Structure formats: structure tokens, C-alpha cells
Image (tube, rainbow, N blue to C red):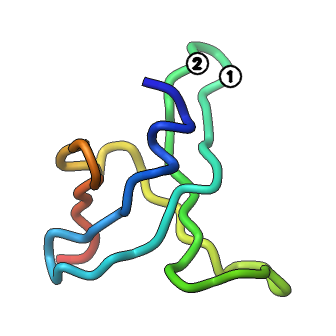
């Protein structure tokens, strides 16, 4: 799977069903190339003027990667 394949999927929190946004970047472990986390831009955001608005989702929080959506578990 390519990063571009992941970027076309919506990110949905299984706790509350909220659509978190879309992947704009990933953090990689430089030693082994494994994905550490996904960087997600909030839904409906077109231009980024400030910092700290994006969400970082740890790879361990991913429940399932489907054809159109990535399910994550964020919160309690």
C-alpha cells in the first residue's frame, strides 16, 4: 500500500463515529522505516495558517484499514 492510497481514505473514530479528517503526512522510524504515526488535517480545513491544528494518530490506535476508511480508537 502506498501513502497516496492512505491519503484518499477518511479517518473515523470508532468511539464516537466522528470523521477526523484526512492524512497529510506520516512519521517514520528512521531506523527501520516503520510508520510511527499519521498526521491528519481536520475535516473542512483548506488552508493552514496556524500550527498545532493537525492531529497526530499513533499507529497503535488504528483498528482497521478498509477500502474507503481508516478506523481509529481515540479517547476512552
Which residue is label 2 attached to?
33
- The quadrant in which residue 72 appears is bottom left
Q: Is residue 46 above or below residue 31?
A: below
Residue at left offset 28%, top offset 51%: 68
Instruction: Quadrant for the C terminus, please.
Output: bottom left
In the picture shown, does residue 13 fall above or below 6?
below
The residue under label 1 is 30
Q: Circle 1 sits in a helix, a strand or a loop, which is it?
A: loop
Question: Neighbour class for label 1 at 10 Å: few (<14), some, many (≥20)?
Answer: few
Q: Residues within 10 Å of mark 2 (few under 14, many from 20)?
A: few
Q: On the picture, is 16 further left or further right than 9?
A: left
Tell me the number on the disc at residue 18.
none
Q: Does the residue at mark 1 contact the one at mark 2 (Cβ under 8 Å)?
A: yes
The structure residue drawn at horizontal position 14% and vertical position 76%, both measured from the top left corner, is: 15
Q: Give the number of marks.
A: 2
Element assignment for label 2: loop
Residue 4 x/y as whole percent: 56, 38
| The N terminus, quarter of image | top left
Amino acid at each position: 500500500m502506498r501513502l497516496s492510497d492512505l491519503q484518499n481514505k477518511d479517518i473515523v473514530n470508532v468511539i464516537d463515529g466522528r470523521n477526523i479528517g484526512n492524512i497529510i503526512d506520516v512519521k517514520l522510524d528512521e531506523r527501520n522505516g516503520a510508520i510511527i504515526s499519521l498526521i491528519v488535517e481536520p475535516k473542512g480545513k483548506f488552508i493552514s495558517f496556524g500550527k498545532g491544528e493537525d492531529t497526530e494518530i499513533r499507529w497503535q490506535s488504528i483498528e482497521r484499514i478498509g477500502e474507503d476508511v481508516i478506523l481509529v480508537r481515540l479517547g476512552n
